């Protein structure tokens, strides 16, 4: 069955633009959380480590270095767990 409306190329272009938006939101949000986490390391009312880990989790989808950091954190957490 053929759907009426936009041609297939226009739909793919819209999906690519949406994907780019999501990537930028993840990058900005991830770096914002990391910066907030760094500030939180020195301020008693912010959970610095938690914010840094959340920022790395967001960035890990797009940045290989963040993915490696998350793998190290997961391995460290497994060792702590026993």
Image: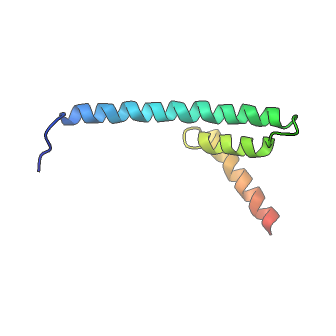
Does residue 28 sit above or below 49 in this rendering?
A: above
Which quadrant of the rendered structure holds the C terminus? Answer: bottom right
Across the whole image, how many numbered discs are drawn on residues? Answer: 0
Pinpoint residue 4: horizontal percent, then vertical percent.
13, 40
Say left or right for 32 vs 26.
Answer: right
Q: Is residue 12 left or right of residue 5?
A: right
Residue 63 vertical position relative to residue 28 in the rendered view, above or below: below
**Left or right: 2 as drawn, with respect to 31:** left
Instruction: From the viewer's perspective, tell me whether residue 50 is left or right of residue 42.
Output: left
- Out of 9 and 5, give the one closest to the viewer: 5
Q: Is residue 36 above or below residue 50?
A: above
Whole-percent x and y of residue 9? 23, 33
Given residues 62 and 6, the one toward you in this image is 6
Farthest-out residue, bottom: 82
| Outermost residue toward the left in this view | 1
The percent coordinates of residue 71 (x first, y second) are 67, 52
Q: For residue 41, what is the image quadrant?
A: top right
User: Which residue is rendered at x = 76% and y = 59% of the image?
Assistant: 77
Residue 74 found in image quarter: bottom right
Q: Residue at x 73, y 58 (%)?
A: 75
| Quadrant of residue 59 within the rendered picture | top right
Residue drawn at 75 percent across, 63 percent down: 78
The figure's colour scheme reads rainbow
Q: Residue at x 88, y 39 (%)?
A: 44
Percent across and percent down for residue 56 are 66, 42
């Amino acid at each position: 069955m053929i759907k009426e409306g936009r041609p297939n190329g226009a739909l793919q272009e819209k999906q690519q633009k949406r994907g780019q938006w999501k990537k930028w939101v993840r990058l900005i949000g991830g770096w914002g959380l990391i910066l907030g986490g760094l500030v939180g390391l020195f301020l008693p009312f912010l959970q610095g480590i938690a914010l840094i880990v959340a920022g790395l989790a967001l960035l890990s989808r797009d940045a290989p270095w963040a993915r490696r950091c998350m793998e190290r954190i997961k391995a460290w957490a497994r060792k702590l767990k026993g």
